Image (tube, coloured by chain):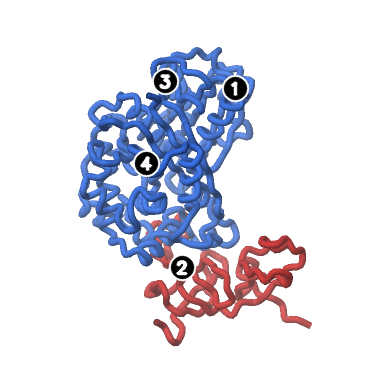
Chain colours: A red, B blue
Amino acid sequence: MTAEILDWTRGGAGIAYQTCASCGAVWYFQRGFCPVCGDGNPVTRQASGAGTVYARTSVARAPTEELRAHAPYLIVLVDADEGFRLMAHGDPTLEIGDWVRARFIDLAGRKIPYFEPADGRR
Amino acid sequence: MSWITGVGLTAYGKHPGRGTLDLMSDAAAAALADAQLERAEVDGLVCGYSTTMPHLMLATVFAEHFGLKPTYAHAIQVGGATGFAMAMLAHHLTESGVARNILVVAGENRLTGQSRDSAIQTLAQVGHPAYEVPLGATIPAYYGLVASRYIHEYGHREADLAELAVLMRRHASLHSGAQYREPITVETVLGSKSIASPLKLLDCCPVSDGGAAFVVSRDRSNDFAVRIIGTGQAHTHQHVSAAASLTQFGAASSAARAQEAAGVAIGDIDYAAIYDSFTITLTILLEEIGLAARGAAGRLAAEGHFNHDGKLPLNTHGGLLSYGHCGVGGAMAHLVETHLQLTGRAGKRQARNVRRALLHGDGGVLSSHVSLVVERAA
């Protein structure tokens, strides 16, 4: 039996991604086929939560009243070690190129990935 | 080849009490008068969308309201690229004989027709509903991410971005229809409040009410001799998380297609109308298209290169950053200004010897690109 894959977009404390057994593509947004070759049997996998910061922005102007209480917050794009990119929140000190690892926090009633500096930070 | 036979543009800013159809009508009437065409001569109609008046059939609603009975009509949507995409469509429709005179029109009371929060939330929906929007991401945040990576790669300073905001304001100061005309300095931009780092308030275009229209025709209807000679598009992703790179987008390939279709090189361009939703947008588009070297857009702006009397006049009406941004009409104002420049009607803003222009718009997060090459016939 395989362990259940945790996916923060479905309430779990984990990051899921998909791979294609046919062409080797790796991607983040889940779907029932490979967006590169069209193969109909993508494999959903659990990411380690480790990666590198690709881009960062500190959001001062939040879109809703609920989120206003959290502002400013850091939004990051992280290149996951597994080869896909994801958007998440992160520690305000993070800079581009930093090695990071995800934990999960509650934001406006849902679990979201939050990246913190990992050992070996550049 | 097709002719842009007339243009119409309202002032941008606040038009309290005026709705989408009112602003569209104002612009459309101005464009028809400019083209010296009657309603009955318009057989094609292309519209975009309005966030304050979402409708399944905006073109037909407008046709009924304005009094048109076109034989071809519909709306399209490509975010900020919609205006130039409509021009491209109208160009090909007239070329292929589907219609003779196509009215392209947009208008929206985006500023006074809804709350600021509502506008911000509607626009944030270009983000992914499951993977991005729940994180409290906004349009400035998506562009803040892009900016962080782009300046990391190419070494821009925040002051370099600010130079483009200063430039657009300088241009807007010469246009009575612009939303913001009070001159600003690099220091004003750098000192404005943070929105999504490194972007500050004055790095972001405002939200505006306004309307814009133009007529694309198979034959000339007046003395104006402005024609569309090349078009191109490129669509590389929708969501910033799914973009292959934040330093190379579809702008270069889109512009290259338009130039190839027109049979011109980048050096033949003497006026530029480039989408400027944020200072980083304008920076990236100028540099990727090849109108500025990587890292050089801000310096060129500071040196006067993009002034109306400079080497390559750019968005001489003030662009989205200072003329204003009412949605689909936003970039259409760039085309209207281009037409005024090419026909010698830009008044105090008139550039010298403008013959050939490159227009470029993007929608989403540098996701959808549309380029046009427009020239004044000899």
On the rendered image, what quadrant is the C terminus of chain B found in?
Answer: top left
Residue at 59% across, 76% down = A82
Q: Give, as a three-letter code, the residue at label 4.
A: Leu
Residue at 59% across, 33% down = B75
Identify residue for label 2: A76
Q: Give, as a three-letter code, the residue at label 1.
A: Ala
Judge by depth and name the residue closer to the eye, A120 or B207.
A120
Spatial CA distance of label 3 from label 2 is: 46 Å
The reply to whether the C-beta atoms of the residues labelled 1 and 3 are less than 8 Å apart is no
Identify residue for label 1: B99
Q: Judge if badges 2 and 1 mark residues of a common chain.
A: no
Nearest to N terminus: mark 1 or mark 3 = 3
Q: Is residue B174 above or below residue B321?
A: above
> Viewer-nearest of labels 4 and 1?
1
Spatial CA distance of label 4 from label 2 is: 27 Å
Residue B144, quarter of the rendered image: bottom left
Residue A42 appears in the picture as rendered: yes
Q: Give, as a three-letter code, the residue at label 3.
A: Ala
Q: Judge if badges 3 and 2 mark residues of a common chain.
A: no
Q: Which chain does the numbered disc 4 sit on? A: B
